[in-house]
Amino acid sequence: MTETLTHEAIADSAREADYLQRARSIASLIREEAAAIESDRTITKPVADALVELGLHGMLIPEELGGGGLLPSEGMRVFEEVAKSDASTGWAWMASEWGTAGVIGYLASEVVEELLSRDEKFIVAGQLLPRHPGVQVEGGYIINGGYSFASGSDHATWIGAGFYVADEQGNPILGENGQPQARIALLPRDQVEFENNWDVWGLAGTGSHDYTVSKKFVPAEYTTPTFGGTPTRSETMYKLTNELAGGLPHASIALGIATRALELVANVTAGKMRPNYTVPVGDADFFRIEFARKEANLQAARLYVYDVTRSAEAVVNAGDPVTPEHVARVQQMLSWVHEVTSDIVEFAHRWGGSQSIGRTSTLGRFVRDMHVATQHLLVDPKMLVDAAGVLLPVYAQAEV
């Protein structure tokens, strides 16, 4: 195994172990399809179908609604497992699964029942942060504008579009707190125009296309708050709040990429000779010292990711609210873990030699994927600045 604790040992529940096994059962399929996923720039149909048929799409939906009912931390472990097989698949599925479960917790129960009772699977993708004004009209909002980064959109059935509530002139209608009201509109996929323009050199198969919503009316009951708001359900994910939970699963993808990169470079260097080496690369002391350090960094990063997440879960499940320090810890963790995992993947790239630069090489694909993952808004170094603003006073108050 490539973890300090085995996959089975770190499963917090039988249901988590079950979903981890489901993910492992299609690992070979995903790896066989990975090259096609990258070249075709989308999750292939066999993989997309397997995610639905195995219930992986729906693992975070409450059990009462027919889903797996996994805790956020449990679902993150399954995302990590899939990302080890293919980062694009892990990312696209993560984005749509997390988004789908997230909006369900803020929709009225009758709307959720209607959406989940349809023949086609309820799968949400799209850009959920507010981009444009949504003109408030009787019964709902008019959404009009272009959006980007709709990860998972190729196989979604509903598309989210972030907006802020506005009047007919596009001026924000402020909420009771005096701030703009950010919301997410949900539209059937056939009401959205996609450009099919996600053409990048890493995470190429995520389907993160641009799309346009052209003056579509969305009933108020098919919208949810982007931040704050009162959830309609009481599961842990919704107690965590959108502000804390929104970026959490990105850490899982980074961990999966880094783990697979170490597995690949360990395989590449085993028995591999280089000029002027008296032993295979994998046996060289200077390679082994660096490998051990990078592997330790990976273990430390993984422990911090799940410690931050599970600590927040325990707090809210005990009836206490999320604090600014909890949010700061998540911001810190997300930015830092991407620094750590990027460094690990760079190590694998350097030692992979020709196996890391080939256009069709597996290691090369994971190197490219990691470089794109570090560009996400939610893992920007600015998150460390914001986190330090909360954490510094904690340390400054200590007795000296």
Image: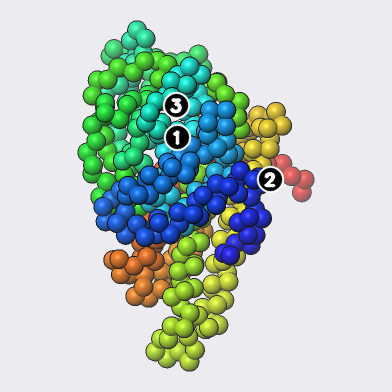
Q: Residue at x 61, y 32 (%)?
A: 236
Can residue 328 be seen here? The reply is no
Tell me what residue is drawn at x 64 percent, y 38 percent: 312
Query: Which residue position holds label 3?
Result: 116
Q: Which of marks 2 and 1 is in front?
A: 1
Residue type at tag 2? Tyr
Q: What is the spatial separation of the Cα atoms under label 2 and label 1, in whole angstroms? A: 35 Å
Which circle's residue, 2 or 1, is located before the other in the chain? Answer: 1
Q: In which quarter of the image is residue 122?
A: top left
Using the image, tell me which numbered label, if any, was put on residue 99.
Answer: 1
The x and y percentages for residue 131 are 34, 29
Return the residue at label 2: 395
Q: What residue type is labelled 3?
A: Leu
Whichever of labels 1 and 3 marks the residue nearer the N terminus, that label is: 1
Q: How crowded is mark 3: few (under 14 residues within 10 Å), some or many (20 or more)?
A: some
Q: In this view, does 307 lie above or below 229?
A: below
x, y percent for residue 208: 32, 43
Q: How crowded is mark 1: few (under 14 residues within 10 Å), some or many (20 or more)?
A: many
The residue lying at 58 percent from left, 65 percent from top is 1
